[in-house]
Amino acid sequence: MAVGLFGGSFDPPHAGHVHFAREALKRFGLDRLIWLVSPGNPLKADAPASMDRRIALCRTVATHPKIHVSRAEGVLGTRYTAETLAALMARFPGVRFVWLMGADNLAQLHRWNDWTQIMDRVPVGILARPGFRLAARNSVAARRYRAARLPDAASRLLARQPPPCWCFVNMPMRSDASSLIRSRGEW
Ligand SMILES: Nc1ncnc2c1ncn2[C@@H]1O[C@H](COP(=O)(O)OP(=O)(O)OP(=O)(O)O)[C@@H](O)[C@H]1O
Ligand SMILES: O=C(O)c1ccc[n+]([C@@H]2O[C@H](COP(=O)([O-])O)[C@@H](O)[C@H]2O)c1
């Protein structure tokens, strides 16, 4: 079973997240995709809305039968992705986890706690995001793991590759952003 972990603040969730999840399921050949709602991004200064409020809205927008919304990080008490992955892999040894994120997060992955452990432990699927193609391509992570890149055309094989392995996939992009919704006072 290949399971994509789509970590996010989802403060609030939006159509860009739904589009991302549907594309990731298809393009990375995943059996399931989990929206892993974060208790709070360690690199973001402002605390998000409550977990209950974000989870409730995620469940109303993420209605695809292969998508599940999870508060696992709240239950496990983990906040750093490397830690969450270690806990989930120990608990579900038969599952092939794939970490999923947008190009903006690849651009700053080297600032995450124990970020090389993430790259070394699970395949990583990255989807394009408007304005971040260049920053992602020139990122510390992309350069350090250049040899481990899977071509876009082979993206469906990602979950079966031994890590480190990452794949950047282009898709029709959407410019939705939670910060934009918050700045309009709509959340
Ligand atoms: N429009 C989008 N296109 C592609 N990826 C996206 C898009 N919006 C969010 N993502 C990805 O979804 C994941 C969760 O994002 P997050 O919940 O922080 O939303 P956001 O819109 O980026 O929020 P904010 O504007 O507050 O930073 C991240 O990996 C991010 O890269
Ligand atoms: O582990 C870290 O140091 C780390 C730093 C920044 C972000 N993350 C994770 O990246 C995911 C995307 O975060 P966000 O706020 O961009 O939606 C979410 O699961 C965060 O927990 C993780």
Image (tube, grey):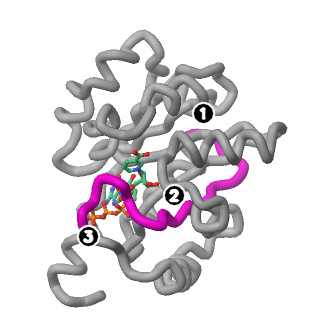
Q: What type is the residue that disc 1 sits on?
A: Arg
Q: Residue furthest top?
A: 147
Which of the 4 image quadrants contains residue 2? top right
Q: Secondary structure at mark 3?
A: loop
Q: Which residue is mark 2?
A: 21
Q: Earlier in the sequence, mark 2 or mark 1?
A: 2
**Is residue 184 depicted above or below 128 in this figure?**
below
User: Residue visible at 37% across and 64% down?
Assistant: 16
Q: Secondary structure at mark 2?
A: helix
**Which numbered tag is attached to residue 156?**
1
Report the mark closest to the observer, 3 or 2. Answer: 3
**Residue drawn where x is 40% and y is 33% of the image:** 168
Horizontal relation, residue 51 to residue 163: left or right: left
Dominant secondary structure of the residues highlighted in magenta in the image: loop
Label 2 and label 1: CA atoms lie apart by: 14 Å
Q: Decide if residue 67 is in sight here.
A: no
Q: Which residues are magenta?
A: 28-45
Q: Residue at x 70, y 47 (%)?
A: 88
Of all residues, the one furthest to the right in this rendering is 94
